[in-house]
Amino acid sequence: MTYTLANIDGRAALVAGDQWYDLETVSGGESGPDPMMVLVAPDRLRALSSVLDQHESSGSVDAARFGPPVPRPRNVFAVGLNYQAHADEGSMEVPDNPLVFTKFPSCLVGPTADVEMRSDAVDYEGELVVVIGPGGKDIDPADAWDHVVGLMVGQDISDRPVQFAAKPPHFDLGKSFDTFGPVGPVMVSPDAVDRDRLRIITEVNGEVRQDCTTDQMIFDIPTLVSYLSRVTTLTTGDLIFTGTPEGIGATQGKFLADGDVITTRVEGIGTMNNRCVRIGDHRVC
Ligand code: ZN
């Protein structure tokens, strides 16, 4: 049985079709309302999802307010240059090992949140995001999927001037402004989708900018999970932004402008719509 987890009004919810079900309610109080608490138990998510038809729906998905499905991860890892065509468009060499940086967890927002921009060179990066379920250390690639509780759509929003303000460039700051980590709309179980080949599409105001499949990743999900776990203990709820395919704005001179709407879709998972709002100047560089 597959599952689709959401954060609706700050509470864990299971989604089936166009309806959602409050998780604490369908669990009879056994699970609490915090979306973070259920990530360690994929089997419980599976079991509860299999009996949703015995419960009354809490509401329709259309009218629901979605937050980030994983609101408070301890760590948010991200991977740069993980698609050959994206490395090529920036005239960058593909790294021999995963190029890892972090997005501060404080940048996470939901799938309909505004992106608050503080310069004229803010960029989109549509990505598949991995959610760690049962944590672990020194995870073998062959066991890596056992540690993944779900997959989400994500945007690795990037302020390019800050990213390249220092030499060598530092990724973390320019990609961690408040609101620079939209994720959602739901987290699906890996077995609900073709986990090795998912199509990612990013549109800006309806114009397709990125359209690629995740089988083009240089370092695949098991490799990334294993690699990170050899350095740091992966903890339930940790996120991994797995890298963006080609088509970013910087290489086309098409940065995000006030009022733009970014639509990010991963087939089989869902769609996010985030409006861009220019709220001021960061004066960082
Ligand atoms: Zn990225």
Image: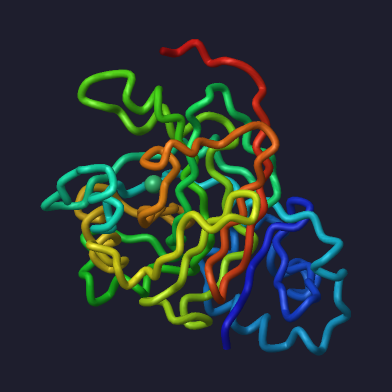
| Residue at image point 15% right, 52% down | 97
Task: Name which residue lies at 85% across and 70% down.
Answer: 60
202 or 47, nearer to the observer: 202
x, y percentage for residue 139?
A: 24, 65
Q: Quadrant of residue 50?
A: bottom right
Residue 36 visible? The answer is no
Instruction: State how many labels appear.
Output: 0
> Residue 223: x, y in percent?
23, 64
Question: On the picture, is 27 further left or further right than 75?
Answer: right
Quarter the C terminus occupies: top left
Instruction: Check the image and report above or below for 258 versus 145.
Output: above
Would you identify the image quadrant in which residue 129 lies? bottom left
Residue visible at 28% across and 48% down in the picture? 89
* Residue 28: percent from left, percent from top: 78, 74
Q: Position of residue 113 (x, y in %)?
A: 69, 44
Q: Is residue 109 left or right of residue 21?
A: left
- Camera sees residue 112: yes
Question: In the picture, residue 245 is in which quadrant?
Answer: bottom left
